[in-house]
Image (spheres, rainbow, N blue to C red):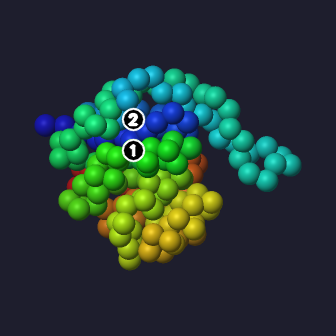
């Protein structure tokens, strides 16, 4: 039976950070469920850098269907978890179901791929990152440290079942490592 992967998302998820993992998992033959606060068409965004601007800019990108709501997901039915970044993590972390969903993958040692702003979700779950190491977008470094983890200044980092990436340019390595762990 094929592996089942859960992707947590919401409106303003970074387009590359959801589409690349989603299609890469489909290509590998995995059964993929995108979950969000509600099952609906999500508005993704594109983050890019513009000369003269100190931080990234955001533009609307493509629509993408969320297959299920967080409330309807049983994490025990999945073999791996992917959390893309963008601005979605800053508000989906407030959903009452997200801590339970994410905690399941840490507690059961199932592969977790987290990129960019995904660390904002971990920072809301007490002790989930305590003693762990990960990378994330540099603006998330304070959340990583406050959560009791060590911020690793690298494009990619693996700590046990947690594979983390700095941002969308790091997706090939992130997904390669995630798929190896999922199939291993």
**Residue placed furthest toward the right:** 52
Mark 1 in CB contact with mark 2 (< 8 angstroms): yes
Is residue 88 visible in the rendered image? The answer is yes
From the viewer's perspective, is residue 142 above or below residue 174? below
Closer to the N terminus: mark 1 or mark 2? 2
Q: Is residue 100 left or right of residue 131?
A: left
From the viewer's perspective, is residue 26 above or below residue 6? above
**Residue placed furthest toward the left:** 1
Q: Residue 37's mark? A: 2
Relative image position of residue 36 (x, y in whole percent): 39, 35
Is residue 164 visible in the rendered image? The answer is no
Relative image position of residue 28 (x, y in whole percent): 31, 37
Query: In what element is the residue under mark 1?
Result: loop
Q: Residue at x 51, y 72 (%)?
A: 145
Q: Residue at x 46, y 36 (%)?
A: 10
Q: Residue at x 54, y 53 (%)?
A: 116
Nearer the observer, 46 or 72: 72
Relative image position of residue 117 (x, y in whole percent): 53, 52
Q: Is residue 99 left or right of residue 44?
A: left
Residue labelled with disc 1: 95
From the viewer's perspective, is residue 47 above or below residue 177? above
Q: Quadrant of the C terminus?
A: bottom left
Q: Quadrant of the N terminus?
A: top left
Query: In what element is the residue under mark 2?
Result: loop
Q: Residue at x 52, y 38 (%)?
A: 13
Image quadrant of residue 2? top left
Q: Is residue 163 left or right of residue 170?
A: left
């Amino acid at each position: 039976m094929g592996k089942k992967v859960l992707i947590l998302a919401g409106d303003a998820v970074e387009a590359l950070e959801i589409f690349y993992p989603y299609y890469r998992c489909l290509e590998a033959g995995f059964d993929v469920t995108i979950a969000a606060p509600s099952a609906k068409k999500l508005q993704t965004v594109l983050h890019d850098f513009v000369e003269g601007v100190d931080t990234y800019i955001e533009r609307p990108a493509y629509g993408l269907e969320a297959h299920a709501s967080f409330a309807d997901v049983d994490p025990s039915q999945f073999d791996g978890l992917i959390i893309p970044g963008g601005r979605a993590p800053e508000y989906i972390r407030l959903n009452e179901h997200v801590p339970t969903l994410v905690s399941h993958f840490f507690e059961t040692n199932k592969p977790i791929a987290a990129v960019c702003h995904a660390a904002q979700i971990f920072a809301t779950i007490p002790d989930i990152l305590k003693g762990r190491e990960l990378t994330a977008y540099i603006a998330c470094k304070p959340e990583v440290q406050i959560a009791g983890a060590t911020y690793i200044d690298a494009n990619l980092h693996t700590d046990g079942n947690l594979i983390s990436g700095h941002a969308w340019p790091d997706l090939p390595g992130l997904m390669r490592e995630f798929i190896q762990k999922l199939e291993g």
